[in-house]
Image (spheres, rainbow, N blue to C red):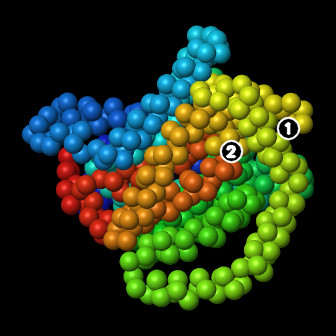
Amino acid sequence: MAPSIFNQLTAEEQLVYSALIFSYPIYVVGGLYVLGSVLGWALLGVFLLRVYLLGKAKFPVPILALVSPIVWFWILAMLVMLAALLIAHIDRQLGTGATIKSTIGWAKGWALLALFPLLGCITTIRPQVVTRGVCVAAASAIPFALLGIAAYVIGLSGELYMSPFKVIGGPEEAFRVRLFGINPETGMARWQFTGPWAPAAGLLSCFQLVICLQESNRRWRLLGIAGALTMCLLCQSRAGWAIFIAIVPIMILLSTLKHPLSWIAAAIILPALVLLGEPIYQWVLESYTQVKESRPGSTRVRGTLARLALQRWENEAPIWGHGTVERGPKIVEYMPIGTHHSWYGLLFVKGIVGLFALALPLALTSIYMLIAAQKSKTARTALGICVIMLSYSFFENLEILAYIYWPALLWLGISLRPQINHTGTTLAPGRV
């Protein structure tokens, strides 16, 4: 490690770096959900304490002036999420206990989508610290996978235990510690790594890939990419495979729009696509159908959950939603209605208000990063993060998994920080 960077970490950087490099030990003791849910608030507390103790001598510029308007928009949108939750609970008379529980859930989920970008914007956490920590975390997937493969080959169960941290509340699967799981449709091993379920590992692998590519140390960069690839392959997530393959070409394409060669290439490719449009469309459609048919049970459950969520949203609670997910019928294997899809889930739980509370800040951030990515490598990675969030929102509930992809949210804030120049280095690191 470079002594100039890693021997002089601030308290906030040390928390972030330690949380990343010890991801798997923390997962093994069942504390990852607790870590991801609490870390952001702890970082905010440390930062506010620093401001209080050092005062204007170290922070001559008002802290709020450093917050990007886009981050303010995220904060406002997540407060709207909270308002929708409270109104829905009151409207449907869900009771004080349920309201308190759901509010705590908001603080551990939706609030993190604004909190970590805020922290990335106002603190002096350097992107180099995040990239190295993510590389270490991603590379740790390789020995974890080898251990799971060995256990599977000799016939051991992948289930280890249920963490006692489950008492704090949250998705039960987030506290179930496994070396690997079993795909019920094939009977083969399927790895979830540090995620609560296997597709979540696919999401995490995509985020890790785009961040690891920014690592300056070649050895750690290759190890991080290899770890992310291992996660993506062994999690067997169809969405994860597709996004993992496509994300880097998409980032390169979208970040070179100002280059004349990009427009020349577009002028050549677009007419060709028009001429070949019909066979390409048929090929894509057939490929998509084959992917869905590879796991027909999962596809059926997801489709039925989507229809149930839409029908009940439209007929029962179109504005503010139902306030909480509800257990589904046998036809969806009792999966909760409002899960497996961010947009359908938002409509069901928080109504049309909740849907716009995510769609608007995500769209605004994506547009901003698209423009900034033409000059900044840091923003290029942030653009990739936005593309992944948007893509995966059609397969997962983003708020439930925020506790594992918080480094990506932190990176968004770093990209919006005014002290970051176009090479991704800090102009005013503010060492303490």
Residue 414: in sight, yes or no? yes
At 82% across and 55% down in the image, what residue appears? 189
Residue toward you, 223 or 297: 297
Looking at the picture, how far across and down is residue 213, in whole percent? Answer: 48, 69
**Secondary element at tag 2:** loop
Kindly identify which residue carries mark 1.
332
Q: Amino acid at mark 2?
A: His
Q: Position of residue 404 (x, y in %)?
A: 56, 46
Residue at figure coordinates x 57%, y 58% from the top left: 388
Is residue 95 left or right of 40 when viewed as pictured? right
Q: Nearer the viewer, residue 72 or 353?
A: 353
Rounded to the nearest whole Å, what is the CA distance between mark 2 and mark 1? 14 Å
Relative to 18, say whether 313 is above or below: above
- The residue shown at (44%, 72%) is 255
Mark 1 lies on a secondary structure that is helix
Identify whether 148 is placed above or below 372. above
Examine the rendering and report whether any part of residue 28 can be seen: no
Residue hosting label 2: 341
The residue at the far left in this view is 57
Please, what is the three-letter code of the amino acid marked with disc 1? Val
Q: Earlier in the sequence, mark 2 or mark 1?
A: 1
Few, some or many C-alpha atoms within 10 Å of disc 2 (few <14, some 14-19, many ≥20)?
many
Residue occupying the point 71% across, 32% down: 314
At which x and y percent is residue 386?
50, 56
